[in-house]
Image (cartoon, helix red, strand yellow):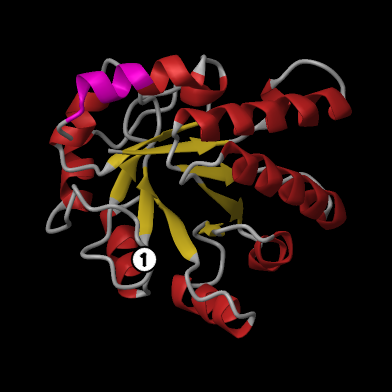
Amino acid sequence: MILYYITDRRQFPGDELERRERLLLKISEAARAGVDMIQLREKDIRMRDLEALARAAVRAVHEAGTATRLLINSRSDVAIAAGAHGVHLTGNDIPAGDARVIFAKAGVLNSVIGVSCHSVEEVRMAESQGADFAVFGPVFEKAGRGGVGLDKLREACGGMNAAANVEGPGALGMPALALGGVDVQNARSCLEAGAAGIAGIRLFQHREVADLVARLKSRFESC
């Protein structure tokens, strides 16, 4: 079961400096707790500030001494400059294959490329373009907005190796992670539908991460 934390510093209290400090503490906490991947998704920051934040996040993950990987939202150039493990692409970004070429030209041969997908067709496209995994959703209703449901998640995961880990190029199949209204209670239904793991912002950001990870792994240790 892959655990994927997506950041949003704006949900923390305080001014901008305090929010960034709280975010870095949460990233460190998540890495130490064994979260598999963290997506630094701070889209409203200027590139120079984003690179500085990314470098600090990379240090926090490295100092945790775990296998957690840090991905930067959309910006392959920032990911390379900061020494992150890869990039997470949206539907408006370049194809996964093009991003991998950018990393390879920079001498980064084991980059991890994730893609946000909102339909089965987008998942298939991401896989054909060489993505390592997809984040699919929203699965459940959230904040009054309807989700695509478990049937669509099941279809998106069809034919993929749900038990696969993200191992970079050459991994067997392409894992799809469930996003959108996912919590401890409904996570099992996502995994049973074929999801390789779960992704979220509030799920990780507003909880004690070590306790959350322990609860999830104890309930779904065979997933």
Q: Is residue 7 above or below residue 96?
A: above
* Start-end of magenta stretch: 214-221
Is residue 200 magenta-colored?
A: no
| Residue 133 point in image, percent of width and height | 36, 57
Q: Is residue 87 left or right of residue 121?
A: right
Quarter of the rendering containing residue 107: bottom right
Within 10 Å of disc 1 (Cα), the crowding (few <14, some 14-19, many 20+) is many
- At horizontal 34% and vertical 32% (from top left) the residue drawn is 147
Circle 1 SS class: helix
Which residue occupies the foreground of this view, 9 or 214? 214
- At horizontal 82% and vertical 50% (from top left) the residue drawn is 52
Q: Is residue 33 above or below residue 43?
A: above
Q: Which residue is mark 1?
A: 126
| Residue 99 point in image, percent of width and height | 54, 73
| Residue 36 point in image, percent of width and height | 42, 42
| Residue 219 point in image, percent of width and height | 21, 19
Callout 1 amino acid: Ala
Q: Quadrant of the C terminus?
A: top left
Q: Quadrant of the N terminus?
A: top left
